[in-house]
């Protein structure tokens, strides 16, 4: 039994749409992670270095 061309085309388009949405969500998540890491780095730089004797506690 053959699969009708219209059904095959719909499934292919649905799969491509799903793949694009996953790729978009991954890109957004990577961007947000990069922004958060940058904010942590800026905050750590603004507070200054940690004194060496505070690490002994």
Image (cartoon, helix red, strand yellow):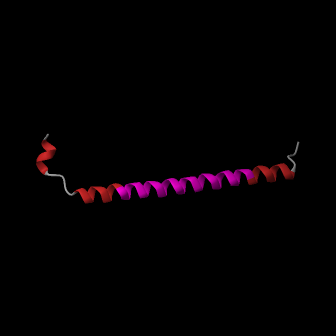
Q: Nearer the viewer, residue 27 or 19?
A: 27
Identity of the residue drawn at 26% across and 59% down: 45
Q: Nearer the viewer, residue 1 or 39?
A: 39
Q: Nearer the viewer, residue 17 or 38?
A: 38
Q: Position of residue 33 (x, y in %)?
A: 44, 54
Q: Where is residue 42 in the image (x, y as percent from the top left)?
A: 31, 59
Identity of the residue drawn at 64% across and 53% down: 19
Identity of the residue drawn at 40% across and 54% down: 36
Q: Give the range drawn in magenta.
A: 14-39
Q: Is residue 53 magenta?
A: no
Q: Main SS of the magenta segment?
A: helix
In this rendering, position of residue 33 left or right of residue 15: left
Q: Position of residue 57 (x, y in %)?
A: 14, 40
Q: Position of residue 12 (x, y in %)?
A: 75, 52
In this rendering, position of residue 35 left or right of residue 9: left
In this rendering, position of residue 41 left or right of residue 56: right
């Amino acid at each position: 039994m053959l699969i009708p061309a219209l059904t095959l085309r719909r499934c292919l388009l649905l799969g491509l749409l799903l793949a694009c949405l996953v790729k978009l969500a991954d890109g957004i998540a990577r961007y947000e992670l990069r922004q958060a890491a940058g904010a942590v780095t800026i905050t750590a730089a603004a507070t200054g270095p940690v004194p060496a004797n505070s690490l002994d506690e």
